Every structure is written in structure tokens, then in C-alpha cells.
Image (cartoon, grey):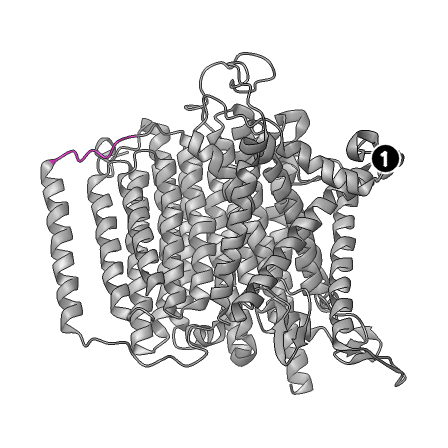
Amino acid sequence: MNPYAALLINAALCALVATLLLFMSRILGRRRGSTVKYEIFETGNPPIGSLRGTRFPVKFYLTAILFIIFDIEVVFMYPWAVAYRQLGWFGLAEMAVFVGVLAGGFAYIWRVGALEWD
Amino acid sequence: MILFWVVAVLSVASALTVVLHGNPVYCALALVMALFQVALMFVALDAHLLALLQVIVYAGAIVVLFLFVIMLLSLEPDVPSPGRYGMRAAAITLTVVLGVEVGAAVLLSEPGSPDPPPLDFGSTRMVAERLFTAHALPFELTSVLLLMAMVAAVVMARRHT
Amino acid sequence: MDLIISFATALVALLICLQVTVLLLWIERKGSALIQDRVGADRATLFGGLLPFNLGIVNTMMADPLKLLTKEDIVPAAADRFLHWLAPWMAVFPLFLTFAVVPFGDVLVIGGRQINLQAVELPGGILFVLAMVSLGVYGVIVGGWASNSRYAFLGGVRGSAQMISYEIPMGLALVSVALTYGTLDLQEIARAQGQLMWGVVPAWGIFYQPIAFILLFIAGIAESKRAPFDLPEAESELVAGFQTEYSGSKMSMFMMSDFIEVAIVAALTTTLFFGGWQVPFLYRDGFHFAAGFTVTAPPLVVTLLQIVSFLVKVFVLCWIQILIRWSLPRLRYDQLMAFGWKRLLPVGLANVAASAVLVLLLEGWTGA
Amino acid sequence: MEAPVDCYLVLAAILFAIGALGVVLRRNVIVILMSVELMLNAVNVTFVALARKALAVDGQVIVFFVMTVAAAEVAIGLAIVLANFTQRRTVNADEIGLLRW
């Protein structure tokens, strides 16, 4: 059987179970709301101000950006790993150059301190 | 064929959501949906490796970065507001021209499906052997591109802290 | 017929996933009690204590999920309602699906029909697992954002940054495994581990790639957001992190996603490093021991033994993760990030490089 | 029955047009970047469809490079957006102006 058809069957089954679980409390649970219940939890204090507009350290973006770069690097490695035995020493040299260039960049951002969290 | 229509409708709908929805978070999630449909198209077109990489790279990494930026800047929803009428006219003209062009291209080309592909078409090994031999130079240059992106992003981000 | 078989294997994969999760809940509660010298959950009785004895495991396994599912579902007034509903679904769905590609047995032959004991025989199995795990980020970040609460949002941001950071070492570990076996197919990798080294030691992946195993295990624990990497839901700092504003079945889905991730890490490491469903010395027709000593077994028994062996290995690895969770203190956030980027990433790269060179040297040497 | 490859080409063109529409219509830089991603993906589909039609795997190889370019573009693009936001508190393309800091 075509694996992708099987995958589709699996996905349908998993989606069904996940959706059932999602609505379980709506079906089984009781509902007795009050305004206090629907407030945001802030350890008992009434919430002050809005979350929207709060700013965050730039570190988080930087992490995500670096992640994308290295993710692409790893993505190139998978096909390389599979065909590695056919490529031989040429493949090794190829990947060495590729990773070498990126490792240079990695060393740079390390030295500049982009990996530090303080 | 049914599968194609499902994918087609879903992808167009989610693409339109990306373009038209006011809340950028919804745009990003619609983008994930659209990219998933593209992955399904890859499967249908025998690009099995690419379909998986599509999910890893786009859904797993690129849209996550989008979400990060949207959420951390805590942007207010905005309505799509074409500022200038000239732009809107240009957009519609562009779309129509493109549509006509593609329609013509498809009509003029020979119809019918090509031969069934060899069994391992689009398999990891086949793509890899092509990528790392015939296209070795672009592959190496890719690393330079990534290097530049990495360094540029770090420099940009650090300048304003 | 194909459809029925496919549906059946899909059901088995999903059931394994769900059962392991529920069982883990009990193991964790009792295990943590054991570690902390307590009795642990012992109050759940069936039929309101009408039975004179405590059924222990069964009760907790039933009582815990039932209690959660019957709780009131609360969506904060300030939350984004649609995304608040969507987030738990997004957290759980890809993880459910991951089990579809994990092989839990060899080919089973019934009435001349070959049934591969793997719900989806995907040639890119490793990539599929990685893709699904990387989709797990969405539940965390969307859930945190949709709640519109400070604790939830902080937890979501922390959690997603942590998850993406540890995905890179995980990917590198998987690359070195793919290098060793030259394939991305999980079933093929499991089969390749069926041989013996020097006639005694099973040729499991851990003997080829010990560093990759450690990398994958650490990165996997970080992905599942459990101690010592439980900063996104650090109770003492962030209440419950991204799931603060969730209750009832939605909260149970987030909890479940953590446990499923534990199970996924265990199943993946079992398949890649501990021979998957392989039982040492067991072949398709029975046991073949070293000195020509043979015990034949019917195919059904062999298959059963394989499934049991798979599950036992999975549970042992889950238990190790639970031990780690209850033994180690929480890292600080800067330590967490530094560990991921400055330690695991270079080690992962070095491991890939070393494996690449070794593969060429050894195979060139043996002429394979 | 399987859909002929041409169908995918048309679909890709439609997606590309929608992406182009987004680039022109929206003023939020981040959404503009998303629309660009959409366009890149439409191009990817075209490459893969033509690779299937010509039975040459090179079309799929090119998609690798497109993905890389997309990733690099997003990384730098969003870094610029960020740098701009910290200075001017806006992501509106009209207010940002051209290359003035």
C-alpha cells in the first residue's frame, strides 16, 4: 500500500482522537462560570495593564534566526548522509567546506557574544 | 483527482487568508497551512524528500521565526489597507496578466501526463546524488549565503541593544 | 483488505502511544514517590470504595484522566478564543502521528500476506519524526500567546526558544545515525541491528554511535520540557508556564504531549540505538545461540516476542527519563542556552565529522 | 485518477498571484514577507511539477536552493524589521520609507 495513503489514514485517526479529547471537557464537564473565573491568573491580583505592548529581549529573535541557519545546514546533511557511500572522499571534502564556512560564522558569533544570555 | 481539488481549494483559501486576514498571528498560521498543502503537492509530484524537508524548514523553522517576531513585537491587528489606488490597480493588472499568461502557456503546451517516473524518482538517494555532484558549486555557495545571513542578523540585532 | 490492515496498524500505533502515556502517568506518580520516599497516589478506589482492596495501578490510570476530562473548561475572557482552542490540538496531533512511522515489529506473515508492523512505511522516517517534533513548538507558542496572560506568554516564549535550540543537536545526532546506516528508513535501521558482533554482542546502534545516543537523549529530554529543562513550566517562577490558563481536557492534552514526547524519545532511541524490536539471537524462525544451539519458534510467537521486546526497551528508557527528572535540579536559562549552543552543537558537529571519516576509513579498509 | 501535472502548474500560478497581491496590498512589512514566502513556494511547486514532467530530478535540487534563499531572506528581513521597530515603533512599509535609518 502506498505509504502516503497509509499516512493519510493515520492522520485522520489521530485528528479524530485529538479533536475528541479537545471537546471532552465541554461535553463531560459542568459549567459554572463567574467573572472572576474568566479573569487572567496573576497570583490573585487583578491584572494590571495589557500584555500587548510588552517588549522582549532581542536574544529570543537571535536564537530563532540562528536556529533557521543551522536548521538549513542540517537539512542539507540528510541527503548527504544517505548518499555518502556513493560520494566517497569527494562528498566528505564537499561537506567539510560547507560546514567549515558555517563554522567560521559560528566562531564569529560566539566571539562577538551573540550566544551569551545575561 | 479528488485529492488535487482538496489540496487546491485548501491552499488557495489559506493563501488568501495570509493575504487578507487582519491579525498577523492568523496570517502566520494560515501560512503554515498553505505550506502544508505545498508539501502535499510535492508528494503528489513524486518529490518525497522535498515534502518532508518542506515541513521541517518552512513549518518548523521559518514560520516559527515569523511568529516570534509578531508576538514579541506584540503587533496590533491591522486591516489590509491599500494606501494608493495606483498600487491596487497595479496589483489587479498584474494578477490578470499573470493569469492570462499561465493559461496561454498551459493551453499551448502538449496536454496529457508524462510517463510514469522510475520507482526511485524523488527519493533521497537520487536527489542527493544529483545535488552533490552536478550542483556541487551552488551547494558550496549556499554556505556563503547562510554565513552572510548569520553574520548580518547578529550585527543588525546587536546594533540596537 | 489493504485498507483494513492499514487501519489496524494505525490503530495499534495510536493505542501504543495512548497506553504508554497513561501508563507513564502512573509510573511517574509512583516512581517519584519511590524516589522521595513517599507512598504516592493510593486513594483512588473503584466504585467509591465498595471493593475491599485497592486496585492501585488500574485505579490511578483511570481516575487521573477521568478527573481531568470532567473538569470545567475555562477560556479566559481576554484570550483569543479560537487560538486558545487550537493550541492544545496543535500540541498533541503531530506527536500522535509520530508513532505511525515507528516500527514495533518485523514483518508478520498471516495467510501468505505480509504485514509490516509499522503503520506507515515511510522511506524518510527519521525526517518525518524530526518534522513532527518540530511542529510541537506551535502548541507551546500559540497556547502561551492566545491566553493573553503574562505567565503563559513568558512560558511560551521560553519554551519555544528552548525547543528550537535543542532541535539542532537532535538533528545532528540523527544525521550521524543516518550516516552509519546510509538510510533514513526506521524499519531498515532496526533490521540492520539484527546481526551480532563477534558472535556475541548484538550489533545495536549504541555501540556504533554512543555520542549520538547521548546527544539525542539530552536533546529529547529538553524537547519534552521536563526537568532539568523544565523552565517553560517552572512552577516556582511561572505558575505553570504556557498552560497556566488551561483547564480540563485541554490542560490534560498539554500534559499528555509532554508524556508522549517522553515516549517518543524512548521509542526513537530504542529504534536507532537499541535494536528496535530486535531480540538478541532471535531470528524469524527462532533463537540461534552462539554454539549452534537452536530453539525454533512459530512466527506468531516471534512477532509477539519482538513487540514485547520493543515495549520493554521503551519503558526502560522512559524510566531512565523519569529518574533524571526527579534527580536533577532545574537549570538556569542562560545555562540552558549555553549548554545547547556551546556544548551540544559543537559536539554534534564533531560527531558527524568523526563518523563521516570513520565510515570512509573502515569501509575502504574492509573493501565494502 | 491522478491529476495531470499541468493542473499543478496552474495552481502554482494562482498561488503566486495571491502572494504578489499580498505584497502589493499589505502595508505590514511582516505580512509582506509572508507573501513573498508564498510566492517562493509557488515557484517551488512549478519547479517540482516541471521536474516531474521532464523526469529530471534537477528541478527538485533547485528547490533546495530556493529554500535556503527563503531562509536567509527571512532571517535578514526580520532582523531589519526588528532594528527598524526598535527605532521607530512601526512595521508599516509606508512609514518606514526607503533605506533611511
Residue located 51% across and 19% down the image? A38
Residue B132 point in image, percent of width and height: 45, 73
Q: Quadrant of residue B86?
A: top left
- Left or right: C320 in relation to B24: right
Which is the main secondary structure of the residues drawn in magenta? loop
Amino acid type at image mark 1: Leu
Quadrant where the N terminus of chain C sits is bottom right
Residue located 20% across and 33% down the image? B81
Q: Quadrant of residue B135?
A: bottom left
Crowd tier of the residue under label 1, counting other residues whose Cα lies within 10 Å: few below 14, some 14–19, many 20 or above: few
Residue C225 point in image, percent of width and height: 64, 41
View extreme (bottom): residue: C367
Looking at the rendered structure, the secondary structure element under dot 1 is loop
Residue indicated by mark 1: C51
Q: Is residue B114 above or below residue B39?
A: below
Residue B119 point in image, percent of width and height: 44, 80
Q: Is residue C124 above or below residue C80?
A: below
